[in-house]
């Protein structure tokens, strides 16, 4: 009987150890700097009046986050871009923009170079959600001081495009896609949880992700995400290249993420995304009947901390 009792006790202890919860959350240190280096390859296939048009856009960028304050439930961060680059492989040829280019005639590369080192302020919750983004619009506005020679309508269009791509809402959505991955409570291996993220870069969409805690190593944890993406407001038009467009798109995304066990910061991540649907050009004097453009977007992204 004593042996049975001891065996039972050992089983309880072992079970208790195996079921030990892991606190998957950000645990950043004041004064420390954390880096994100992202590479994205986006393939866009459009059907315009029966003619297929393919574009491949490669985007590279590095961002540095410095922790200026550690609060009970969030962090105050100073954030800046370290490098930005984009290569567009279009039917008419290849175009490259890079923050390291030194060419005053290349307006977009010059704008990217002016963004480098410009600090803005972010409040990030310990579950990775972006609570607030400050000063980024004013930083973008300040980039255009040397471009007074451009026509006013071109300048306004450039400002709108930069804000749409790099403004507060766009930043929030694109960063949360890879940082807002943590559960609100400690979890066991195999546990799942759901997170909703609003994406605002180019169009408004809602991403619903089921994350799963898949592995725990000596110095890392791995999280897998399966997402559903859908246009949030199918009737809302946005301005793109001077034309009002609305989107009706649906898609999916698979994320494999390895995070540092101590800090929660991403060590590396791979993300695969596929979105299909239609873009609609609103009726206008140049296009009285408007236009429906079937499209497919396939995105492959890698993120590292160096």
Image (cartoon, rainbow, N blue to C red):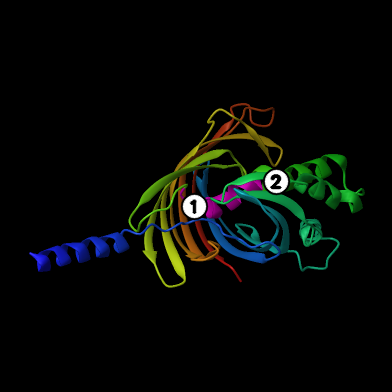
User: Which quadrant of the figure has residue 194?
Assistant: top left
Q: Is residue 3 visible?
A: yes
> What is the secondary structure assignment of the residue under circle 2?
strand
- Say left or right for 33 vs 181: right
Main SS of the magenta segment?
Answer: helix
Q: Which residues are magenta?
A: 170-183
Query: Distance of mark 2 from mark 1, alpha carbons?
Result: 19 Å
**Image coordinates for residue 199, horizontal then vertical, percent:** 57, 43
Residue 249 image point, x, y percent: 48, 39
In-image side of 134 versus 61 (left or right): right
Where does label 1 land, which residue? Answer: 181
With 154 as the anchor, is 132 left or right in this view? left
Q: Residue 95: in sight, yes or no?
A: no
Answer with left or right where residue 289 lies relative to residue 100: left
Q: Residue 180 location, x and y as percent?
A: 53, 50
Q: Quadrant of the N terminus?
A: bottom left
Q: Residue at x 61, y 49 (%)?
A: 72
SS class of the residue under badge 1?
A: loop
- Give the residue at mark 2: 133
Q: Earlier in the sequence, mark 2 or mark 1?
A: 2
| Relative image position of residue 132 (x, y in whole percent) | 67, 44
Instruction: Report if residue 88 lies within the magenta region.
Output: no
């Amino acid at each position: 009987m004593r042996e049975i009792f001891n065996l039972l006790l050992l089983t309880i202890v072992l079970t208790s150890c195996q079921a030990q919860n892991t606190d998957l959350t950000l645990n950043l240190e004041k004064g420390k700097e954390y880096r994100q280096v992202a590479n994205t390859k986006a393939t866009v296939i459009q059907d315009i009046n029966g003619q297929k048009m393919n574009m491949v856009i490669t985007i590279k960028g590095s961002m540095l986050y410095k922790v200026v304050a550690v609060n009970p439930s969030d962090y105050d961060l100073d954030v800046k871009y370290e490098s930005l680059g984009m290569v567009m492989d279009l039917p008419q040829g290849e175009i490259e923009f890079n923050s390291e280019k030194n060419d005053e005639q290349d307006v977009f590369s010059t704008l990217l170079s002016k963004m480098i080192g410009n600090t803005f302020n972010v409040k990030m919750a310990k579950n990775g959600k972006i609570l607030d983004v400050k000063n980024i619009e004013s930083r973008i506005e300040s980039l255009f001081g040397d471009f007074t020679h451009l026509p006013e309508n071109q300048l306004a269009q450039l400002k709108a495009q930069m804000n749409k791509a790099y403004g507060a809402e766009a930043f929030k959505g694109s960063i949360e896609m890879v940082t807002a991955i943590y559960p609100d409570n400690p979890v066991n291996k195999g546990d799942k949880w759901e997170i909703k993220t609003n994406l605002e870069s180019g169009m408004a969409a809602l991403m619903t992700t089921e994350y799963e805690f898949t592995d725990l190593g000596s110095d890392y944890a791995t999280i897998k995400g399966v997402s559903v993406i859908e246009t949030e407001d199918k009737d809302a038009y946005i301005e793109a290249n001077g034309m009002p467009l609305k989107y009706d798109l649906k898609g999916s995304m698979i994320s494999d993420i390895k995070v540092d066990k101590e800090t929660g910061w991403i060590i590396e991540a791979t993300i695969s995304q596929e979105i299909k649907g239609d873009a609609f050009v609103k009726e206008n004097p140049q296009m009285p009947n408007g236009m429906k453009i079937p499209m497919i977007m396939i995105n492959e992204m890698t993120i590292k901390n160096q």
